[in-house]
Image (cartoon, rainbow, N blue to C red):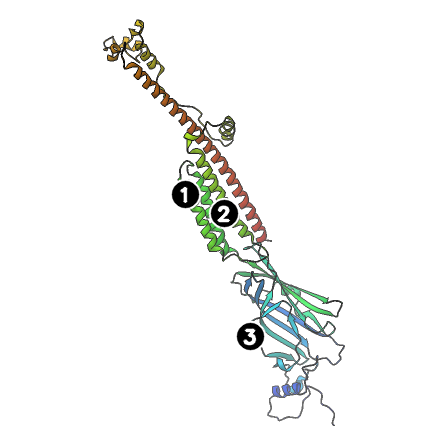
Amino acid sequence: AGPQRRRGTAVPADPDTPALLRLSDSLLAHYKKSTRPVRDWRTTTTVAIDVMVYAILSVDEKNQVLTTYIWYRQHWTDEFLQWDPACFDNITQISLPAESIWVPDILINEFVDVGKSPDVPYVYVRHHGEVQNLKPIQVVTACSLDIYNFPFDVQNCSLTFTSWLHNIRDINLSLWRTPELVKFDRSIFMNQGEWELLYVLSHFQEFSVKSSDSYAEMKFYVVIRRRPLFYTVSLLLPSIFLMVMDIVGFYLPPNSGERVSFKITLLLGYSVFLIIVSDTLPATAVGTPLIGIYFVVCMALLVISLTETILIVRLIHNQDLQPHVPSWVKHLLLERAAVLLCMAIRMSRSHTQIPALCLQRFFSLTSLDPAAKLNHYGCEDPREREVAGGTRPAPAFGSLAEGSPLMPSILHEISTIRQFLEKRDEFRDVAREWLQVGYVLDVLLFRAYLLAVLAYTITLGALWSLWQYA
């Protein structure tokens, strides 16, 4: 047998055959794609890889799955695909079918599903044996998603590239570009979706399983951040508006039934709001986002507000069945708390009583004492009569007072009327005292409720601000 021709050298061929065809036939004529392309088996094949994120397609918080679209690039040296450009019309690179040559078995460890990636059947080969495999990939990977800070959450998902079979002595990995260029490269990223790309970190490491051979792996950490504007407008602002209306509802008079109806309507509206937005909130079996806790606390605050209103209304109604306000309650609420809250409480009591002078005149007229008949003008002051000149006629009942059988019944009716008026005034004083207690207690509870709402709001706002700009 004649001497074997060296691969990549010119062979006698038809002068009309294109140079590309002659080069392709020369390279693939005796190529064995089942063998790692090195002449010395101790030589390590180094595969340089690169990742460029094109788009974030979806983030499934429930299933903990991230779907991205990346541009993946890798290159390695194939010692069996080398030629002299001078022998092939100065051709320095050629595209060959990927299925006809050896390709490293580099996979992504986090793969959970085969994405809809376009098939790129060719690779580029340069005259010194460098093979470039460039292809877009839709990557469906598992990712540990932390939704506690939703909608101000930042997710960090890794893409781990490694050879599934070959150890580090056969296939080693390296970066195509420097880590700084990979980190801040957003030149092809579609930046109009819900998620924005912050950066891509890269890290090389070796690992082994149970003291077996070491394997090389290249990790790319894709760090993305959610844009919170949509969720702020659709979730947070309606809830804030309803809470503001609940606070404004405290300015309705507590002794009117409209406040209870108003707060019940707010509570019902907030319940309907939570039912509508329940599908928008991310759901996982691991934890609940902070915004879900925020909604629950807001609902609890509305229930507390309604309960406080019902207690105040119950306190200031049905006053006829209530005893006098205890002295310690007066001291704490009407004196101490009123001063602390800068409230002016009027403690005066107004009684509607029959004038004592009038009753004294009447009782003197009904007696048998002759001296009592000196003044026959009932409730009139004697000085008024002197001013009148003594021209007024004497009252008619004066002459009928003595020994009249109707007089005892008249006296009984007058006493009954007096007792009724005094009892009514007493009930009014009790009702007024409880009403003042209700007003002071309502203002006190309202300010405590307002402080709780403000502290809760400031705490959540500070936390979300720190997370957003962290």
Q: Are marks 1 and 3 in contact (CB under 8 Å)?
A: no
Give the farthest residue toward the front.
Answer: 405
For the residue marked with disc 2, what is the amino acid? Met
Dot 3 lies on which element?
loop
Check disc 2 and report the residue beneath it.
299
Q: Which mark is residue 186?
A: none
Check disc 3 and report the residue beneath it.
118
For the residue marked with disc 1, what is the amino acid? Ser
Which is nearer the N-term, disc 1 or disc 3?
A: 3
For the residue marked with disc 3, what is the amino acid? Pro
Q: Are marks 3 and 2 in contact (CB under 8 Å)?
A: no
Structural crowding at the residue carrying mark 3, measured as other residues with C-alpha within 10 Å and reported as few (<14), some (14–19) or many (≥20): few
Dot 1 lies on which element?
helix
The residues bearing labels 3 and 2 have C-alpha atoms spaced at a distance of 49 Å
Q: Indicate the quadrant where residue 396 lies.
A: top left
Check disc 1 and report the residue beneath it.
261
Q: Indicate the quadrant where residue 456 lies.
A: top right
Residue 94 can be seen, yes or no:
no
In this rendering, which labeled residue sits more in front, label 1 or label 3?
1
Q: Indicate the quadrant where residue 41 lies.
A: bottom right
Please name whichever residue, 57 or 115, is drawn nearer the observer in this view of the structure: 115
Please name whichever residue, 462 or 327, is drawn nearer the observer in this view of the structure: 327
